[in-house]
C-alpha cells in the first residue's frame, strides 16, 4: 500500500461517497454508477483509483463486477493518523 495513493484516493468527494456507499455492503459497478450524475466512465475511473489504493476489492460474478470495502487499509490509515493526535504517552 502506498500512503500517497491512499491519500490521493481519499481526497476526492466522489470517491469518499463511493466508500460510504460500500460501508453497507458490496455493490455492482452499475449500482454505484446509478447514484451519481456523472458518466459511467468517470465512475469507472474513480473505482480504478480506489482499487489502486487498495481501498476496495472487486470480484466478477457472472457478467457483473461487484465492489466491496477493504476496511483493513482504512484501519491502517486511522492508526497512522492517530499517532498525530498526541497525548501524554506521546510527550
Image: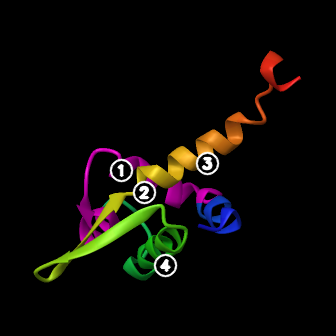
Under tag 4, what secondary structure?
helix
Q: Quadrant of the C terminus?
A: top right
Taking the image as drawn, is residue 66 in sight? yes
Closer to the N terminus: mark 3 or mark 1? 1
Q: Position of residue 10 (x, y in %)?
A: 60, 57
Q: Within 10 Å of the Cα at label 3, are there few (<14), some (14-19), or many (20+) other Cα atoms?
A: some
Separation of disc 4 and disc 3 at Cα?
A: 22 Å
What segment carries the magenta color? Answer: 10-34
The answer to whether residue 87 is visible is no
Q: What residue is shown with label 2?
A: 18
Choose the circle earlier in sequence order: 2 or 3.
2
At which x and y percent is residue 46?
49, 71
The disc at residue 77 is 3
Q: Disc 4, disc 3: CB below 8 Å? A: no
Q: Which residue is mark 1?
A: 21
N-terminal of the two: label 2 or label 4?
Answer: 2
Give the CA separation, mark 1 to mark 2: 5 Å
Q: Main secondary structure of the magenta part?
A: helix
Looking at this view, name the residue that lies furthest to the top.
Answer: 88
Q: Residues within 10 Å of mark 2 (few under 14, many from 20)?
A: many
- The residue at 25%/57% (across/down) is 26
Quick check: 42 above or below 5? below
SS assignment at label 2: helix
Determine the CA span between mark 2 and mark 4: 12 Å
In the rendered view, tell whether residue 65 sits above or below residue 76. below
Report the side of 66 relative to 10 (left or right): left
Q: Residue furthest left?
A: 62
Task: Residue under label 4, please give it.
Answer: 45
Residue that sits furthest to the right in the current view: 91
Instruction: Tell which circle, 4 or 3, labels the residue nearer the N-terminal end.
Output: 4
Label 3 SS: helix
Amino acid at each position: 500500500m502506498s500512503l500517497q495513493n491512499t491519500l490521493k484516493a481519499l481526497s476526492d468527494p466522489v470517491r469518499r461517497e463511493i466508500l460510504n456507499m460500500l460501508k453497507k455492503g458490496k455493490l455492482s459497478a452499475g449500482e454505484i454508477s446509478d447514484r451519481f450524475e456523472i458518466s459511467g466512465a468517470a465512475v469507472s475511473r474513480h473505482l480504478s483509483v480506489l482499487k489502486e489504493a487498495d481501498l476496495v476489492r472487486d470480484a466478477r460474478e457472472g457478467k457483473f463486477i461487484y465492489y466491496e470495502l477493504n476496511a483493513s487499509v482504512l484501519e491502517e490509515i486511522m492508526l497512522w493518523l492517530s499517532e498525530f493526535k498526541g497525548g501524554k504517552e506521546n510527550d
